[in-house]
Amino acid sequence: MELLVPEIGLVILQTIAFLLLMFLLAKFAWKPVLAAIKEREQSIDEALNKAELAKQEMTRLTAQNEELMKEARSERDRILKEAKTLKDNILHEAKNQAHTEGVKLIEKAKIEIENQKKAALAELKSQVSTLSIDIAERILRNQLTDKAKQQDLVASLLKDVELN
Amino acid sequence: MDCSHVFEFKVNRLIVVFALFLAFFSHASVALAQADTAHAGENSHTKAEKKFDIGKFALHHIGDSHSWHVIGNTYISLPVILYTSNGFVTFSSGDFLHDDEAKIVVERKGMGFVKLHEKIYYASANANSHGQYVDLDEKHHASNARPLDISITKNVCTLIFSIIVILAVFLNVANGYKKRKGKSPKGLQSWMEPIILFVRDDIAKPNLGHKYERFMPYLLTVFFFIWFNNMLGLVPFLPGGANLTGNIAVTMVLAIATFCLTVFNGNKYYWKHIFMPDVPWWMYIVMVPVELFGIFTKPIALMIRLFANITAGHILVLSLICLVFVFNSLYIAPISIAFAVFIGAIELLVAFIQAFIFTILSALFIGMAIEEHH
């Protein structure tokens, strides 16, 4: 049972030694060690948080880029489409215009031709009449110069005419 | 399939080892009982010389001593410091000439001192029939007065040595943090950091909550003090071998430290729980004394647990080694050494577990005292 009775001397020395040890360790070991560990943990946490934020920023930027690309693509498509319709319109219009212009020209030409024809015909008519009169005049003149013949003719004519 | 075979094999081996161990342990206890009866029956010392007394041997080795037995007949004499009625007295324990039976009187400042079973008494004027300068009562206990003995005993030497070791280790560790600020730990630092973190994250934080930082110095100190000294106690030669954490005075001081922290940090909820628990008033007659008793039983349990575990480990190892002398045969040596190694390995585990248990229970008790209720 001697084991169960604490020695007063050892109690005193143990108390002094333990308090001294605790004081020294607390001041020179635990305080800096715990502070350093805490600081390091905080810096690790911070770094991890920062990495996470950077990752998020990265995904955000990528998404943004994607969006921009998409927009640009659709813009290009839209512009191309617009240009095409514009071209089609212009082409169509030009065709129409050309067509109407042609028709108009042809019409004009037709009218002109008609007019020319008419004028030519009129001139032809007048020339024909002049010529005919001239010819007739000359024939008549010619005919009338030859008396004997005239007499023959009259005689023949008279011969044909039967006095009924 | 292979794995299960290995496992079965291991289990079988373990069972065999335990069976053998139990068989030998029962032998050892029989031997102890025989030794006890021999001790009870003896009146003269001549008989004791023949019979090896395993109990006495073990108790001598786990107890404190004024000189340090190195090997064979080599002893280191340690200084004796006494506070007597005439002031401080110091002399070397070598002056007792290895006497532990109060037969040699050391005279200092006009006072005589004798050493009986590693305790120092004021010497009686005359020797008794056995030549001892003490007055023995019928139970063979000295009835002489004792001076206050604050000698540098074997335990105190170990205490000082362990403090130097702990300080050296942790100042080195702290220096590592200063040198490699914010960098990963290295060397001794990376050995100790997981354990410091273990104390912080698995002992302090769960039990003490957000106010854990205040108690970290105490918990860390108590943990490493107990652990280092448990380990030192397992070293069979100088400077280890002393049974410091298995000494009731040491565990008492540690338990009192926890007790003081609990009592002085207890908040109003803690004291209300003790003096005005939430029970019908007529239950107070039972509850208040029980709760008051509980304040003291908790640290006493801490004190006894550490003391008993470490002392039991030492006694077990010593008993196993002593089987050689009990059977008085060298052939028993391989078996007793095998078991001593086996128990020694368990003791290494116990050294850590007991430090852990003492620290976590201290944290738990303090945590109960500072817990906030709403």
Image (cartoon, rainbow, N blue to C red):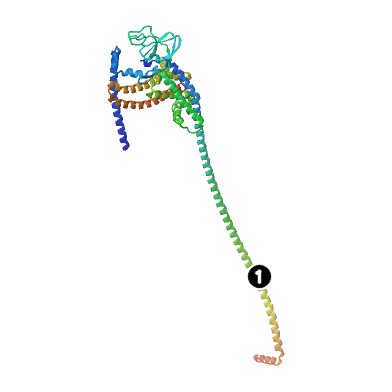
Tell me if I can see residue A124 in this picture.
Answer: yes
Lateral position of residue B265 relative to residue B59, left or right: right
Give residue A35's position: percent from left, percent from top: 51, 28
Front residue of B218/A32: it is A32
Give the structural element (helix, strand or loop) at label 1.
helix
Q: Quadrant of residue B284?
A: top left
Give residue A76's position: percent from left, percent from top: 56, 51
Give residue A132's position: percent from left, percent from top: 68, 82
Chain bearing tag 1 is A
Tell me if I can see residue B281 in this picture.
Answer: no
Q: Quadrant of residue B40?
A: top left
Residue at the disc numbered 1: A112
Give residue B231's position: percent from left, percent from top: 40, 25
Local crowd size for mark 1, using a 10 Å CA cut-off: few (<14), some (14–19), many (≥20):
few
- The quadrant of the rendering that contains the N terminus of chain B is top left
Residue positioned most to the top: B125
Q: Quadrant of residue B363?
A: top left
What is the count of numbered marks? Answer: 1
**Vertical position of residue B36 compared to residue B341: above or below:** above
Front residue of B58/A59: it is B58
Lateral position of residue B353 relative to residue B45, left or right: right
Lateral position of residue A156 relative to residue B303, left or right: right
Front residue of B213/B291: it is B213
**Vertical position of residue B181 compared to residue B293: above or below:** below
Amino acid under disc 1 = Glu
